[in-house]
Image (tube, helix red, strand yellow):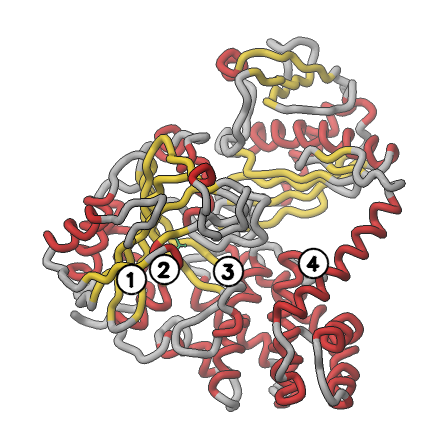
Amino acid sequence: MSYLSSKDIRQKFLEFFEKSGHKVVPSSSLIPTDPSVLLTTAGMQQFKPYFVGTADPMQDFGSKNTASIQKCFRTSDIDEVGDETHLTFFEMLGNFSFGGYFKEEAIKYAHEFITQELGLKIDYVSVFEGDSEVPKDVESEKIWRSLGVNEIKYAGRADNFWGPTGAEGPCGPTTEIYVNGVEIWNIVFNEYYMHADLPAGASAKEGKSLEPLKQKGVDTGMGLERLAMVTQNKPTIFETDLFSPLLEKIPDLEIKKQRVVADHARGIIFLLGDGVRPSNKEAGYILRRLMRRVFVYENLHKFRPDFLEELIKVVIENYSHFYPELKENRNEIINEMWMEHERFAKTVSHGLKELEKQTAINAKVAFHLYESFGLPYEVIKEMGAKRAEKLNREEFDEEFKKHQEISRAGMEKKFGGHGLILNTGELKAGSEEELNKVLRLHTATHLLQRALREVLGPEVKQAGSDITAERTRFDFNFSRKLTPEEIKKVEDLVNEKIKEDLPVNFKEMPKEEAEKTGALFFFKEKYPDKVKVYYIGKSLDSAWSKEFCGGPHVNHTGVIGKFKIAKEESIGANTRRIRATVN
Ligand code: SER
């Protein structure tokens, strides 16, 4: 087989599955809509509602089968980055079925793609060995043998059972494909729902925690980097065309450090491109760690000053044909990188000096270095060398958690010991004053969605929203950047409806009836049988805006104040984000 570039592999994969009846779905953002996880870690995440049956794939995709190439980010392998195969950010190729096909087709597709389309030889496959709750997967073994694959290894929960992303979710036994000694494809047969009474990924101890799903599903995941490594016949992922242009730009230093810089640079750029910003918590904290590790190397090894921008340029050049959001957000990516660089430069030299003074670095000392000087764990461990020999991530994370609990306690105090007075998931307010603002922003968000559809057309569909006293954040599906004229039109339209001082009311009714009113609803959400339809206008029939919504809202639009769009950006293929305020 002739040389296949990573571009060719992506294309072959999507064409192969499209040809066999799969709807190709774009990657979702690295910031997931599922609040139980910090970042998108698997291709199946955006499809969770279809696996559990709360959303209908026929309605949304016109097919029970989909395929995607998903941007993924995992911190679980961060300590391994620098070896032959581990990464933080990676692209995952996957095909999925929600009640369409099952084991036979899934295995046949994978076999044909690997052996025929890519011309690779399968070393062996692994299959679930069975335990007290989940039977041995003899069916998969039979299917593999019928295809002439007779090297079969059986393994248990740790290796051949895939658990949910987040606290709970679909899961099931897996079969995995190995090529050139590397695990390349994980095929999950979703047969169960794992409940949240167990930590994520833990194996169920009692039957009640695994509940059979009403509809069986297939979820497969194959890392593009590893696939490129075996297809291009390279000894490590870093020698594939996904990394070589990037490594060329990285100054001469120890190979492991070069690989860390290459991995982290991609991660940083993709996270920034999807709207993550460096901070001290959640996804922002992960991003900050990656950035600061690169900055420390840069500082210690005196890289050229334009080195960071060079890396951004190469990543954007090599990836934006498939991920246009990188190009679109280029300026933000560069600015954020420099801003964090400046923040770090102010403290880094002090931090490294302070680190040098320490004779033994335990978790407490390490946390102090992080807190006061912003040195990430990875850097402390590496620079501390022998003195940080006993330092381990669990103890450091413990310190970190303790600190977060203290600051949370401080926040509760601020809110009078009662925590938030409103928290619907979408709306959050800590005081009466904030509540007033949040309700105004909430009603404004309904007007915004309606105005967007009026100006841009009915393909605008809500993809998420989050409202605090400062601003509303509304995510929606739309394929391109809005023009300044469109933004102005949307703003004017919302302000016009505010001026008209329209009444805001709701009617409660059965879901089917509510759907017939033409009210908008959020397709990923699971609604109860009886729902509230909030409408803005004199009557339900004549209302300008109608949405399925739990409330609460203001009573009439006149109190909202002046509506202003502060920012419009891409947060992933086909997904836009608007931040807006009212004053
Ligand atoms: N969900 C599985 C994984 O992440 C297969 O896509 O490996």
Q: Amino acid at mark 1?
A: Ile
Q: Position of residue 332 (x, y in %)?
A: 63, 61
Q: Quadrant of the C terminus?
A: top right
Alpha carbon of mark 1 to alpha carbon of mark 3: how far? 20 Å
* Residue occupied by mark 4: 281
Q: Residue at x 54, y 15 (%)?
A: 514
* Residue occupied by mark 3: 73
Q: Quadrant of residue 537?
A: top right
Q: Residue at x 21, y 44 (%)?
A: 20
Towards the viewer: 333 or 417: 417
* Residue occupied by mark 1: 9
Q: Are marks 4 and 3 in contact (CB under 8 Å)?
A: no
* Residue occupied by mark 2: 159
Against 75, residue 15 (above or below) is: above
Mark 1 residue element: helix
Towards the viewer: 389 or 515: 389
Mark 4 residue element: loop
Q: Residue at x 50, y 40 (%)?
A: 195
Question: Depth-wise, is mark 4 or mark 1 nearer the camera?
Answer: 4
**Upstream in sequence: badge 3 or badge 2:** 3
Q: Amino acid at mark 2?
A: Asp
Image disc number at residue 134: none
Q: Amino acid at mark 4?
A: Lys
